[in-house]
Amino acid sequence: MRRFALIALVATLAFAAVAAAAEKSKEPFFPRSGNAGYKVDEYEARLGYQPRTGFLNAQVWIGARSTQRLSRFSLDLNGLHVTEVEVDGEAAHFNRGRGKLKVTPQTPIKDREEFAVFVRYQGKPQKVTDPDGGEEGWIRTDDGALAVGEPVGTAAWLPCNNVPNDKASFEITISVPRGLEAVSNGRLALVERERDRRIFHWVENEPMSPYLALVDIGRGQLVKTRPDGLPTWTLVDPRQARASRKVLAQLPDIIRFESGIYGDYPFDWAGSVVDVAPRLGYALETQTRPIYAFVPDLTTVVHETAHQWFGDSVGLQRWPNFWLNEGFATWTEWYYAERHGGRSARQIFRRLYRVPATQTDFWDPPSGHPGTPKNLFATSTYVRGGMTLEALRAEIGTQKLLELLRRWAAGHAYASADIEQFIQLAEEVSGRDLGRFFHRWLYQRGKPSGYGSL
Ligand SMILES: [Zn+2]
């Protein structure tokens, strides 16, 4: 994700020189999210949306596997009215708790058994306000809606196991009034017409965290291209079309550059969604196809594309490890600039390091230990986070750093990982004890001293 304030800071720095659940969730920041006793394999959601009223008529089939015997279980779901729940084809008893749909099947589910849940639900999905005041969830726009789920907004419109480390495949089918388009993750398998509506069938087969699920409904034209053989779907709000054409055309080059340093692009599909949602004010790395709530600049597209490796393919075990997403995407911005005639990542590091501590908020909280969910999107996660990789580069050399990032992307592809595993791999790749280094950069408060001459 990128917020406006950061965009200004980092874009200036980078381009000034060029023209341009399992067990009781255990999620420390969002303990109410996530559910015990099962893992999800697939979601198949059908959404019928009426933009004029904001009303959603929906159903979802969930294929899951139990990790213990279950006489009951729950899914995360905010609000909405549930009318029917079945487990393995049998009507199930259900009730609601805060942010939960609690299900009691007629027959308990045995340990390590596959089971299927069907939920029919409706109502007006709502936005979610995060601990830091940011907005996510279901956001209505003047011609439709969009859904962004970082960190917990997907439960605003989909019953799910809403933790980053329970990844599943997703089929999202969206029915909208004719004249509107609907886009989600992955491949567009089919578009059907039904009276005065059109139905878009989207399929993402690679494992995906619920928070990376995308829905965007609005005017525009879905355009398919195939740069470098990579099928790409793009939907741009007509009001943003002119202004975003040039930057979106850079996507193939950006993917080529990042594949060159991090290894093959992890997904079978790519794309971009540009909508008009002025109050949202950020971009999100929704899997295969980032969404921009404004016309993005080059740095933002570089950032969200880097997340396809770091965040989407290599996912998070838990939210306090967010540095693994944002530090890496931020450093990629700097390295991209360095290799494209902008300032070098080292120059950006030096400039940032010289900013007096009294004039910045990017040192604290330390990026490996944000402390509270309010700090999840703290500037330090991004800026100090990116500086951490640049300082590591100085410590172990460019070749070793790039080897480390490649091996990290390959070793945890389509899975979830944590910071400790990254530190271990860094020590393995460099053959060095980096405990002190990472302690200073990730966990110790304040500006790490001794880097003035870097
Ligand atoms: Zn980001």
Image (cartoon, rainbow, N blue to C red):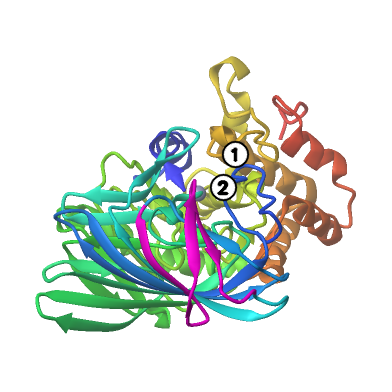
- Badge 2 element: helix
Q: Is mark 2 within 8 Å of ligand 1?
A: yes
Which residue is disc 2 drawn over? 326
- Badge 1 element: helix
Residue under the image location 44 percent in, 60 percent down: 286
Could you say which quadrant of the image residue 34 lies in? bottom right
Left or right of residue 263, residue 233 in this image: left
Left or right of residue 347, residue 234 in this image: left
Magenta stretch bounds: 80-108
Look at the image and say whether residue 252 sits in the magenta stretch.
no
Q: Characterize the local packing of mark 1: few (<14), some (14-19) or many (20 or more) Cα atoms within 10 angstroms.
A: many
Instruction: Specify the amino acid type for callout 2.
Output: Glu
Q: Main secondary structure of the magenta part?
A: strand
**Whether label 2 touches label 1, CB < 8 Å:** yes
Picture coordinates of residue 270, whole percent (x, y): 41, 71
Which residue is disc 1 drawn over? 381
Picture coordinates of residue 413, whole percent (x, y): 64, 70
Residue in front for this viewpoint, 49 or 68 = 68
Residue in front for this viewpoint, 255 or 195 = 195
Left or right of residue 439, residue 47 in this image: left
Picture coordinates of residue 274, whole percent (x, y): 28, 56
Residue in front for this viewpoint, 191 or 360 = 191
